[in-house]
Image (cartoon, rainbow, N blue to C red):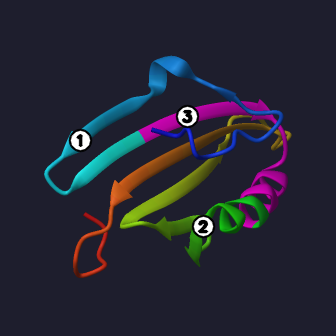
Amino acid sequence: GFESLPLMPGLTELINERVNFDTPAGRIVEAKTQGDIKAQTVEMFYAKTLPQLGWQKIGPLKFERDGERLSIEISTVSRTGENLIVRFAIRPVSPSGAKP
């Protein structure tokens, strides 16, 4: 489900955390990654890279493309702020534009 999204260097996917299924409204895909990297570096990478792949930025770490919404959430798991969990979620955009 994330074949079209680049995995930023320094992040490793947590394979057992992946969710992928289809609904009548569209697909739902979730993945988690982890890495020893700063949140600002992750934000800058995806803010620069995703628009080049056709994703339109609609908010901080939120993008839309082809009727789908991609949300990226970053959480820190260390006191230094450099060991991160980065969660990616793709969900269908509802007709009203509200998140399903």
**Which numbered marker is on residue 22?**
1
Mark 3 is on which residue type?
Lys
Crowding at dot 3, Cα within 10 Å, few <14 / some 14-19 / many 20+, comes out as many
Mark 2 is on which residue type?
Gly
> Residue 51 magenta-drawn?
no
Say which residue appears at 81% left-offset and 44% top-offset. 81
**Which numbered marker is on residue 32?**
3
Say which residue appears at 54% left-offset and 67% top-offset. 63
Q: Gap in Å between the C-alphas at discs 1 and 2?
A: 22 Å
Which residue in the structure is indicated by mark 2?
54
Q: Secondary structure at mark 1?
A: strand
> Residue 41 magenta-drawn?
yes
Mark 1 is on which residue type?
Asp
Q: Residue furthest left?
A: 24
Compared to residue 32, the image places residue 91 above or below, namely below
Q: Secondary structure at mark 2?
A: loop
In primary-sequence order, the first of circles 1 and 2 is 1
Residue 20, given in percent of the width and then of the height, sits at 35, 34
Residue 33 or residue 56, whichever sits in front = 56
Q: Is residue 78 left or right of residue 99?
A: right
Exactly how many numbered labels are in the figure?
Answer: 3
Compared to residue 60, the image places residue 46 above or below, namely above
Q: Residue furthest bottom?
A: 96
Residue 51, given in percent of the width and then of the height, sits at 67, 68
Q: Is residue 53 left or right of residue 2?
A: right
Say which residue appears at 22% left-offset and 77% top-offset. 95
Residue 32, given in percent of the width and then of the height, sits at 55, 34
Q: Which residues are magenta?
A: 30-47
Q: Quadrant of residue 37?
A: top right
Q: Gap in Å between the C-alphas at discs 1 and 3?
A: 19 Å
